[in-house]
């Protein structure tokens, strides 16, 4: 789910767990960074938009793999669909759905969820009593769909679009440090057919909207299709800004519909299942909202004018779950203005950090910004993600340096101050933490996470 563009996709994959003590207050409300944050869906309150949601979205938009810290224990739920098919829902900071076929031939797993839910997933699949996972298929590279590959790749054959293997070793994925076993063994460009557990399983490549490596998986005998992140349970989709294009979603989804059998059950990467007719309606929604925004742009309207005019007011029921209506407008505008693809800054930052430490990374950031501003994607979430990765590695001084640098670059971004406050808390520097949370709240009075941390610090005094 990473993604995008803007709105679309909040960070998608904030993952990487931390002890509850850290970020506790916020993460518990922030759980679903990306898509699962609906109250009621996982029993958690909706997180503060500007942080949980916003970050997810933006990160996605930025095409970066967000690194976040979860408070909720990872959880895997497996429910029977029909025949040999099961639906799997894994939750870390947010939820992702995928499917497994378990039967006489063994287990085929389509997507592997988060790295931190892989252990539980493996146990629960084993409990189905159909033997080990023999094949893993990935519907695209995003870390909420490939994060568990490492747990299965030693024994299973991993199959994915050509782009996935390369992607997982470079760019923003570098900080995920995928082992060789996690990489695809067999890749394809257009189509591939598998025969497993008594049915024909069609893998069809449909890249270009959510990301550059999307495939759909159609279980023709069972009439179940897993659409990965081409289906968002009827909600506005997230888009990977780096390699996807919001303006092409409608077209790609239309193509996907052509591969769906009658009576199909559609499992979405995020959000609820759909029937074919519902998915056709979804395509209409995408097509019409895209047309409205593109028409607005052609008429010379700006993004903020279209948001203010509520040009998608008739479609607002599709917003908010993962991507708000304003974020979808933003994603479409970014898609329409999309220039040549830009490289991820995360890779040079990672190498500079590994070779020369934190000052090497900070220097590299400034050098690249000066010398190659058009080659790399500069976005407020790049250093945010890099800093979050350092937090995950418990390198708190280095992480603080990164967030301070990001604050110099993007002083008005509330979540930066909030995250720095959390790092100071973890260091036991409550006075500095209070200062950071206060600044976060000044910049965004709706930042409930920051407000909660301020209350917490004050209560402890
Ligand atoms: Zn995705």
Image (cartoon, helix red, strand yellow):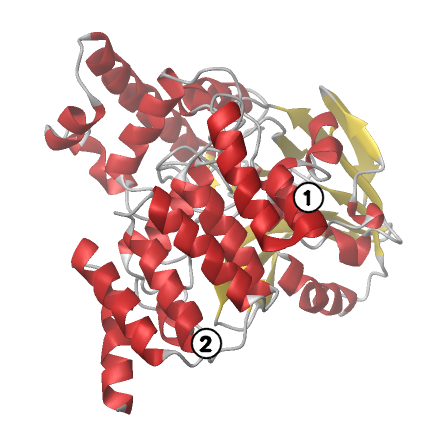
* Residue at 23%, 18% in the rendered image: 292
- What is the quadrant of residue 409 in the picture? top left
Q: Which residue is at the front of the view, 407 or 380? A: 407
Residue 197 lies left or right of residue 330; in this view the side is: right
Q: CA distance from mark 2 to mark 1?
A: 26 Å
* x and y percentages locating residue 25 in the rendered image: 36, 75
Q: Quadrant of the C terminus?
A: bottom left
Badge 2 vs badge 1, beta-carbon distance below 8 Å: no
Q: Secondary structure at mark 1?
A: helix
What residue do we see at 51% from left, 41% from top?
2
Report which residue position mark 1 lands on. 351
- Residue 425 % position (x, y): 40, 76
Which residue ends up furthest to the bottom in the rendered image? 461
- Where does residue 150 sit, x and y in percent of width and height? 77, 54
Q: Is 286 situated above or below 401?
A: above
Quadrant of res 299: top left
Q: Which residue, given by chain and number where applicable, does mark 2 sit on?
A: 426
Visible residue check, residue 196: yes
First reached walking from the N terminus: tag 2 or tag 1: 1
At a point 64% along the width and 43% down the height, the residue shown is 173
Q: Nearer the viewer, residue 139 or 410?
A: 410
In the image, is 322 to the left or to the right of 202? Answer: left
């Amino acid at each position: 789910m990473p993604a995008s563009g803007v709105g679309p996709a909040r960070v998608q994959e904030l993952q990487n767990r931390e002890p509850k003590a850290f970020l506790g207050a916020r993460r518990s409300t922030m759980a679903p960074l990306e898509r699962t944050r609906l109250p009621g869906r996982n029993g958690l309150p909706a997180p503060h938009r500007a942080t949980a949601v916003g970050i997810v979205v933006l990160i996605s938009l930025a095409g970066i793999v967000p690194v976040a810290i979860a408070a909720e224990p990872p959880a895997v739920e497996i429910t029977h669909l029909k025949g040999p098919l099961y639906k799997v829902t894994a939750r870390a900071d947010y939820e992702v759905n995928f499917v497994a076929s378990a039967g006489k031939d063994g287990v085929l797993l389509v997507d592997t969820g988060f790295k931190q839910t892989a252990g539980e997933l493996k146990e629960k699949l084993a409990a189905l009593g159909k033997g080990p996972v023999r094949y893993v298929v990935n519907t695209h590279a995003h870390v909420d769909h490939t994060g568990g590959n490492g747990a299965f790749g030693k024994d299973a054959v991993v199959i994915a679009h050509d782009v996935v293997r390369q992607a997982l070793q470079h760019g923003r994925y570098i900080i995920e440090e995928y082992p060789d076993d996690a990489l695809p063994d067999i890749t394809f460009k257009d189509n591939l057919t598998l025969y497993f557990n008594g049915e024909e399983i069609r893998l069809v490549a449909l890249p270009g909207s959510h990301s550059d490596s999307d495939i759909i998986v159609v279980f023709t005998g069972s009439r179940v299709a897993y659409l990965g992140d081409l289906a968002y349970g009827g909600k506005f989709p997230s888009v990977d800004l780096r390699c996807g294009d919001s303006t092409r979603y409608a077209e790609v989804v239309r193509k996907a519909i052509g591969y769906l059998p009658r009576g199909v059950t559609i499992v979405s990467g995020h959000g609820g299942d759909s029937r074919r007719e519902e998915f056709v309606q979804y395509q209409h929604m995408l097509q019409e909202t895209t047309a409205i925004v593109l028409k607005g742009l052609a008429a010379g309207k700006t993004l903020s004018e279209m948001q203010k005019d509520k040009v998608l007011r008739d479609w607002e029921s599709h917003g908010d779950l993962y991507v708000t209506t304003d974020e979808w407008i933003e994603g479409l505008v970014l898609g329409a203005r999309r220039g040549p693809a830009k490289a991820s800054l995360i890779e040079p930052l990672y190498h500079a950090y590994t070779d020369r430490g934190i000052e090497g990374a900070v220097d590299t950031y400034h050098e690249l910004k000066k010398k190659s501003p058009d080659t790399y994607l500069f976005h407020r979430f790049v250093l945010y993600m890099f800093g979050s990765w350092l937090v995950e590695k418990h390198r708190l001084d280095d992480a603080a340096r990164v967030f301070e640098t990001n604050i110099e670059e993007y002083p008005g971004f509330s979540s930066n101050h909030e995250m720095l406050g959390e790092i100071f808390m973890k260091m036991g520097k409550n006075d500095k933490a209070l200062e950071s949370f206060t600044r976060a709240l000044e910049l965004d009075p709706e930042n409930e996470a920051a407000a909660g941390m301020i209350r917490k610090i004050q209560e402890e005094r």
